[in-house]
């Protein structure tokens, strides 16, 4: 009898030990999905290469379900899927997640009980949706002509600044968390909200990459994050070096920057390099702005004074309204072209244009010799070359 009791106790300890081992190496997600009887619920891993199916179950009338999977070595992302609906959640090592949702609107009704990380992810999602809605409204008002280009850019910048102010504490408060990682990679219209190539935004990526590299070294997601962040830093430094050259040193247009070839009002195209032999003012403007009439009146005075000495203006408009540009530029005596990409044009970043209007002076050999942001200095700079 004693031997039998010992065997039973030993068996219980072994089973308990096996269960503890299993629990320690896995996470469990369970809960109830309402109004989904007969539907198939899928559990998927949201990896770097996309969603990977892990398990599935057909829901019964009570909507109850449970999945168990190996615990991740770092905070990891998963999703539940019903048809085309998905709800994302994070798992931090070994834990049991209790969830509730309704199949009528899986994303909006999905909640994870007593999970700060998932609460923060939900908050990030809500702010992204709110910000995306504001940007869509601005874009529509811009297209309808209710906002001019400069007002649109200013309000767009303000909207993104407000979003970042809300999210920054989530990232810097605990950069090793799933929510911090989730936040830095959020997108609107396929563009990262936090720009890793921006000096202001880069610290967000740097903080998360450094923290993950410390706490979860050698994992796939950490390596990807670290490489992504380091590549962004390298690229940004290269861009800053180019910007410094544009601001402070002569630069040959032909070898240093691509030629500019844009369309005039009459439809013909003019290349910037075709003006070699003249001193050229490369002027970046928007005609549909309050400053434009005064700006062009000032340029007209300069143009009449120096044109006979070999001076030319190559003025690039970034107006979104082509008709407005044509009407405004039709009677100007200098070369007026337009970049159809408007405020999204690569030329603006290529020349490190931070304010409009901004101009550059090219000498007779086509070398970029100085930046003009204060147009009252234009005559003094031209007198050095003409």
Image (spheres, rainbow, N blue to C red):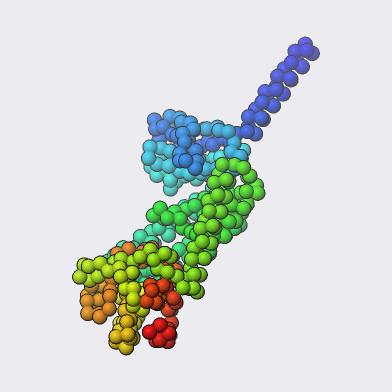
- Residue at the (54%, 59%) spot, across then down: 202
Name the outermost residue toward the right: 2
Tell me the quarter of the picture where residue 59 sits: top left
- Residue at the (38%, 72%) spot, across then down: 366
- Residue at the (53%, 53%) spot, across then down: 231
Whether residue 330 sits left or right of residue 24 in the image: it is left
Q: State the residue in front, 206 or 263.
A: 263
Which quarter of the rendered picture does the C terminus lie within? bottom left
- The total of numbered circles placed on residues is 0
Q: State the residue in front, 115 or 270.
A: 270
Which quarter of the rendered picture does the N terminus lie within? top right
Tell me the quarter of the picture where residue 267 sits: bottom left
The answer to whether one can see residue 129 in this image is: no
State whether residue 350 is above or below residue 333.
Answer: above
State whether residue 344 is above or below residue 287.
Answer: above
Whether residue 223 sits left or right of residue 274 in the image: it is right
State whether residue 278 is above or below residue 352.
Answer: below
Q: State the residue in front, 169 or 368.
A: 368
Whether residue 135 sits left or right of residue 238 in the image: it is left
- Residue at the (56%, 41%) spot, across then down: 220
Relative image position of residue 282 (x, y in whole percent)? 36, 74
Relative image position of residue 31 (x, y in whole percent)? 51, 37
Relative image position of residue 340 (x, y in whole percent)? 29, 64
The answer to whether one can see residue 199 in this image is: yes
Name the outermost residue toward the top: 1
Relative image position of residue 197 (x, y in whole percent)? 50, 59
State whether residue 2 is above or below residue 77.
Answer: above
Q: State the residue in front, 160 or 11.
A: 160
């Amino acid at each position: 009898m004693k031997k039998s009791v010992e065997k039973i106790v030993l068996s219980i300890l072994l089973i308990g030990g096996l269960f503890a081992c299993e629990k320690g190496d896995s996470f469990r997600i369970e809960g109830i999905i309402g109004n989904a009887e007969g539907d198939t619920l899928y559990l998927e891993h949201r990896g770097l290469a996309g969603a990977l199916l892990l398990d599935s179950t057909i829901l019964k009338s009570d909507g109850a379900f449970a999945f168990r999977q190996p615990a991740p070595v770092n905070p990891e992302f998963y999703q539940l899927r019903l048809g085309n609906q998905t709800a994302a959640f994070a798992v931090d090592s070994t834990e049991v997640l209790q969830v509730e949702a309704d199949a009528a609107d899986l994303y909006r009704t999905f909640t994870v009980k007593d999970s700060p990380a998932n609460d923060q992810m939900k908050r990030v999602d809500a702010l992204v949706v709110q910000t995306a809605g504001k940007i869509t409204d601005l874009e529509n008002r811009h297209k309808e002509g209710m906002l001019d280009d400069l007002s649109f850019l200013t309000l767009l910048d303000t909207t993104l600044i407000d979003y970042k102010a809300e999210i920054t504490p989530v990232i810097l408060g605990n950069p090793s968390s799933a929510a911090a990682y989730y936040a830095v990679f959020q997108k609107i219209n396929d563009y990262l909200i936090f720009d890793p190539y921006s000096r202001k935004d880069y610290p967000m990526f740097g903080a998360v990459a450094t923290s993950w590299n410390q706490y979860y070294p050698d994992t796939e997601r950490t390596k990807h994050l670290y490489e992504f962040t380091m590549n962004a830093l390298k690229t940004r430094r290269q861009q800053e070096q180019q910007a410094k050259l544009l601001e402070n040193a002569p630069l040959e247009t032909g070898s240093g920057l691509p030629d500019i070839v844009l369309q005039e009002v009459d439809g013909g195209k003019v290349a910037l390099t075709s003006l070699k032999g003249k001193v050229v003012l490369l002027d970046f403007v928007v005609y549909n702005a309050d400053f434009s009439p005064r700006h062009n009146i000032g340029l007209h005075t300069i143009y009449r004074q120096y044109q006979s000495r070999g001076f030319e203006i190559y003025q690039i408009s970034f107006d979104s309204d082509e008709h407005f540009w044509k009407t405004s530029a039709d009677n100007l005596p200098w070369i007026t072209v337009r970049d159809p990409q408007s405020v999204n044009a690569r030329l603006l970043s290529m020349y490190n244009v931070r304010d409009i209007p901004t101009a550059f002076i090219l000498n007779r050999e086509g070398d970029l010799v100085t930046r003009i942001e204060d147009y009252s200095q234009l005559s003094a700079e031209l007198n050095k070359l003409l």
